Image (cartoon, rainbow, N blue to C red):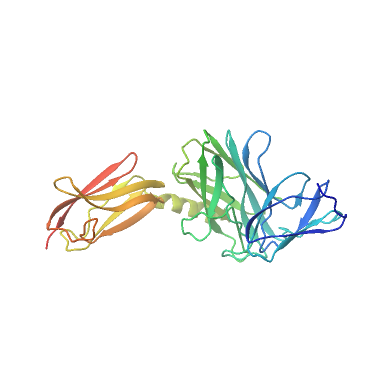
Amino acid sequence: GISVPLVNYTIKLRKGWNMIGSPFAFPVTADYNPETVSGLYLYGDPDRDGWRGPFNGLVPWAGYTIHSKTDNDSIVLKPFDEQESASRSVSSGWSLKLFADGQKYFDHSSYLGRNEFAQEDIDGYDTPKLPSLNGYIIVSIDLDQSGRFGYSSDIRSLEEYNGVWSLSIGANNEPGPIILSGSFSDAWPDNLHIAVVDIPEHSIIDDFPNRNLNINKNLNMGYDLKLVAGDEVYVREMAEKILSDIPKEYSLSQNYPNPFNPLTHLDFALPLRSRIEITIYNMLGQEVTTLVNRELDYGHHSVAWHGKNQFGKPVASGVYLAKLQTSSVIKTRKMILLK
């Protein structure tokens, strides 16, 4: 070990995730710029593995991970700072901490809410998703509705009161069940209502976090949720609208136009996140081309076929078969290419 003077100790950070520890033999507070630096996170507890945090201080002999958005940031450890650190402090707004707990793993790093210093769009108050090991539970948030779910926190401005947060819970080597719960960092804000739309189960938990969500399904592809927060009328109506917009079953529409030359479209619907394959066959059962072969979000989708085979060559006139396949469902449609 090393011996350091009992004065403020500065650790310079690199862009991205950093692993740091405290040189002091007693707990210390930490100060940093919350707009560009995330809080401090610890991995594991005595019984399970997973991320905990964020914290505003460090205890001795522990390794923390912390994220910096630039190469010019630093964190200051204050051995005699009796005042609450400015890091992550808020004078108004609310913050909901999420807890995902399984038998072997957990994730206590995700939170969402509103802060008078934050922006409605992505900014420094939004923490990127923490690294995952071979086994894990992870709660991730889609900030820009891109489907990437690349963040662990989503703190928005006070310009809006109502809002919808898109969440996905993933797991690997976790036997389950997984319980999602939550708690507010401070007192429950007045007149704030929260509901969780359970996409795979097509149900609504309208009194979260007073009531937990129990998940008993395999989460290798992610378990999608929508968290709706705001006034009572908005939360109820928006949760019901989200639920009504979710397809109730897998479907593959008839292509349009039909007959076609050379372009046609196929619409399809997924009731939950799924890995799907859409393949075109000729009437001899030979594969012509694959249009889709990947994991897709739940909802309504469309794909086009330009009447070409897998080598990019136009195919002959005739009847073709479009097949949508998942791990549990097969849907087919006949199509006529007429030149």
Quarter containing the C terminus: bottom left
Residue located 37% across and 50% down the image:
294
- Visible residue check, residue 98: yes
Residue located 49% across and 51% down the image:
239
Q: Nearer the viewer, residue 267 or 294?
A: 294
**Image location of residue 48, percent across then percent down:** 63, 35
The image shows residue 262, relative to residue 95, as above or below, that is below
How many numbered marks appear?
0
* Residue furthest to the front: 1
Residue located 76% across and 44% down the image:
61
- Visible residue check, residue 271: no
**Image location of residue 244, percent across then percent down:** 41, 50
The image shows residue 135, relative to residue 9, as above or below, that is above
**Image location of residue 171, percent across then percent down:** 52, 41
Q: Nearer the viewer, residue 74 or 146?
A: 74
Q: Nearer the viewer, residue 44 or 101?
A: 44
**Location of residue 31 by image quarter:** bottom right
- Left or right of 55, for residue 208: left
**Image location of residue 131, percent across then percent down:** 58, 49
**Location of residue 310 by image quarter:** bottom left
Q: Nearer the viewer, residue 72 or 269?
A: 72
**Location of residue 44 by image quarter:** top right
